[in-house]
Image (cartoon, rainbow, N blue to C red):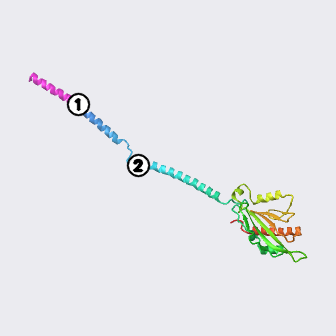
Amino acid sequence: MRVFPVSLTYKMHRIIVIMQVGGWFMKKLIILILAVSIAALTSCSLPQTKGSDLTDSAAKTVTSGDTASEKTAASEQTKTGSTEKTAASSSQSAPSGKTGTAPRIYRPDELLTAEEASSMVGYTVNLEEGSLFTSTDLGYISERYVYDIPSEGSTSTTTIHALLQITQNGLIPADSLKVGQDAKWNFDNEKEFSADEISSIPGLGEDAFYFTGTSQVHVLFQDYYIIIAFEKDPYDAANNVDVNKAIASFIVGALSLAPLTN
């Protein structure tokens, strides 16, 4: 057996120790490398959210937001449209309770011409110049018809200035109509106020009466309250009532055939 010097033996011992320690470190390093590799492989194998997936998710969120905005906008537009319609409806002329729309406005001579009046009173009738009058505050139009009646047993004549007046819903202010002060309201007020001076006329228009002292006939038809005050004989009230009834019936007939709305 070969014997090495002590110094050599010591050196060899150190080399062996160093190799052992180095081996230990190498093992640790290998284990660490393996651990890092396994961790890396595990991380790669986990499911990841793709960039496109994030984009899609954001797009869906934006789309959803847009849809909600569009729905809100559509709802607001619907409300606005409804408000505009309501505003437009409120700005129109107040409709008549009878016709449902703004009633047509008539001049007296549109419903009774001078020639037609002549045939009823039996004298030549003319429209009195400058007599056409419109009251927008009270909602009526009036006009006078002028004619001469010969005096019995004399060459003199009596000039008659007959009146035809039409209160109509198309002329009555909207504020009055809103509170029910329409043509019928005016007629009913006159009828009630003059109850002791009038007599009813059945079957004429919707309602009618005449003044026993003056022979004036008042008639209500649709959106119109008509006053007729003609004379055929200054001394025969009954005859005058008959003439005014005939004229009233003629006007009601004309209105029933004429357009009642604009």
Of residues 186 and 130, the one nearer the viewer is 130
Q: Residues within 10 Å of mark 1 (few under 14, many from 20)?
A: few
Classify 77 as above or below 211: above
Classify 74 as above or below 216: above
Along the polypeptide, which appears first: circle 1 or circle 2? 1
* Residue beneath the point at 86% across and 69% down: 240
Q: Secondary structure at mark 1?
A: helix
* Residue beneath the point at 89% across and 69% down: 236
Left or right for 198, reference 37: right
**Quarter in which the N terminus is drawn:** top left
Q: Residue furthest right?
A: 153
* Residue 165: in magenta span: no
Left or right for 24, reference 232: left
Examine the residues drawn in magenta and state their main secondary structure: helix
Q: Residue 8: x, y in percent?
A: 10, 25
* Residue 15: in magenta span: yes
Q: Residue 113: x, y in percent?
A: 76, 73
Q: Residue 16: x, y in percent?
A: 16, 27
Left or right for 235, reference 22: right
Q: CA distance from mark 1 to mark 2?
A: 48 Å
Q: Which mark is residue 25?
A: 1
Which of the two marks, 1 or 2, is nearer to us in this view?
2
Q: Which region is colored magenta? A: 1-27
What's under tag 1, amino acid-wise? Phe
Q: Residues within 10 Å of mark 2 (few under 14, many from 20)?
A: few
Q: Where, by quadrant of the figure, is residue 141 drawn?
A: bottom right
Classify 235 as above or below 57: below
Q: Residue 173: x, y in percent?
A: 70, 59
Of residues 179 and 123, the one nearer the viewer is 123
What's under tag 2, amino acid-wise? Thr
Classify 1 as above or below 54: above
Q: Which residue is mark 2?
A: 55
